[in-house]
Amino acid sequence: MFNDIGILELATLVVLAVLIFGPDKLPKVIQDVAGFIRKVRSFSESAKQDIRSELGPEFKDFEFEDLNPKTYLRKQLEKDGDLKELKDLRDSFDLRKEMNDVADAVNSTEPEPSSVPAAVNGSPDLTKKTDKPDGGDRPPFDADAT
């Protein structure tokens, strides 16, 4: 439940609990919280048992953890033996290299002739940069064009 809480966070919580509840009321608060957690756990376990009994004998191996999509997929892939193939595929794909290749292609000032097609049927090559009209000013506004 508290797998990701470190020592510093735990010490901070203890100090805050002592400051808020005081050293004389803190044991009673801890007992009340622990009792509440026990009641919630027993309620959830009884609800799970009721659901299992209502589903019938064909769902006797049903686990509620299987409702998590990651767990379900992992179990199905392990059952079929495809998990090893997926790991090999993941290891063969280097995302960092692919991203660097894409960034180099985007940032290059002169396109490679093999990657950019020439003008087709006399249409202009839209990948080439054209100069701005009138020395870099904005083009004139045309009300009829909008």
Image (spheres, rainbow, N blue to C red):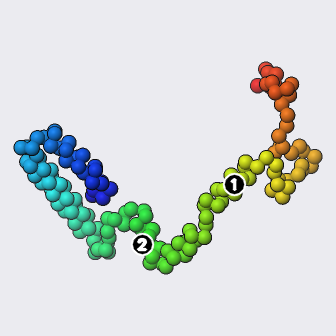
Determine the residue positioned at 24% across, 63% down: 48
Locate residue 118, reporting x and y percent: 88, 51
Q: Is residue 131 left or right of residue 23?
A: right
**80 above or below 11?**
below
Q: Assign the C terminus to one quadrant of the image.
A: top right
Q: Is residue 74 visible?
A: yes
Q: Is residue 43 visible?
A: no
The amino acid sitting under disc 2 is Lys
Q: Assign the N terminus to one quadrant of the image.
A: bottom left
The residue identified by callout 2 is 75
State the image quarter where residue 112 is shown.
bottom right
Determine the residue positioned at 10% across, 46% down: 26
Residue count near mark 1 (Cα–Cα under 10 Å), binned few <14, some 14–19, many ≥20: few
Determine the residue positioned at 81% across, 27% down: 136
The amino acid sitting under disc 1 is Val
The residue identified by callout 1 is 102
Q: Is residue 62 left or right of residue 107?
A: left
Label 1: state its secondary structure. helix
Q: CA–CA distance between discs 2 and 1?
A: 36 Å
Q: Nearer the viewer, residue 46 or 77?
A: 77
Residue count near mark 2 (Cα–Cα under 10 Å), binned few <14, some 14–19, many ≥20: some
Locate residue 60, reporting x and y percent: 29, 74
Locate residue 74, reporting x and y percent: 44, 70
State the image quarter where residue 68 is shown.
bottom left
State the image quarter where residue 90 is shown.
bottom right
